[in-house]
Image: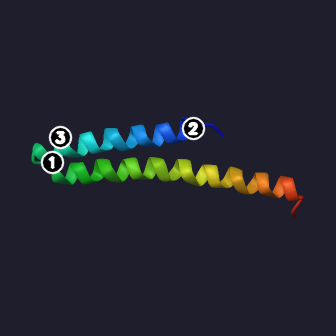
Amino acid sequence: MSLDILFKIAGIGILISVFHTALKQAGKEDMAHLCTLAGFAVVLIWVVQLLGRLFTTVQDVFKLF
């Protein structure tokens, strides 16, 4: 695994914070919270997929199950 996923997560975090701030300044706080939730969901899906790959790699290495 390279550092690409960390840079992607950091990029998503920066974009979401900019969108959240812009929407909050425009008076659309509900949309700002929705945008933050969507960004969190995307990052959470990436992390869950990475954990799945980690567990399958551990199983393959130690010949479990």
In the figure, is residue 34 to the left or right of 1?
A: left
Write down the residue under mark 1. 24
In this figure, which residue is indicated by the disc labeled 3? 22
- Give the quadrant of the N terminus: top right
Q: Tell me the residue at 62%/49% (across/down).
A: 50
In the structure shown, which secondary structural element does the residue marked by tag 3 occupy? Answer: helix
Element under disc 1: helix
Q: Mark 2 sits on what residue?
A: 3
Question: Mark 1 or 2, which is nearer the eye?
Answer: 2
For the residues labelled 3 and 1, say whether their Cβ atoms are less than 8 Å apart. Answer: yes
* Image quadrant where residue 59 sits: bottom right
Check disc 3 and give the amino acid type.
Ala
User: Please, which residue is most extreme toward the bottom here?
Assistant: 65
Helix, strand or loop for disc 2: loop
Pick whichever of labels 3 and 2 is earlier in the sequence: 2
Task: Please give the name of the residue rendered at 31% of the width and 50% of the height, measured from the top-left corner.
Answer: 36
Q: CA distance from mark 3 to mark 2?
A: 29 Å
Check disc 2 and give the amino acid type. Answer: Leu
Front residue of 34/50: it is 50
> Disc 1 marks which amino acid?
Lys
The reply, left or right, for residue 55 in relation to residue 37 is right
Q: Identify which residue is drawn at 44% across, 52% down.
A: 41
Q: Comparing marks 3 and 2, which lies closer to the viewer?
A: 2
Please tell me whether residue 13 is drawn above or below residue 58 in the rendered image.
Answer: above
Instruction: Give the percent coordinates (x, y) of residue 10.
Output: 42, 41
**Callout 1: few (<14), some (14-19), or many (20+) C-alpha neighbours within 10 Å?**
some
Between the residue at mark 1 and the residue at mark 2, the CA separation in whole angstroms equals 32 Å
Q: Position of residue 16 (x, y in %)?
A: 32, 43
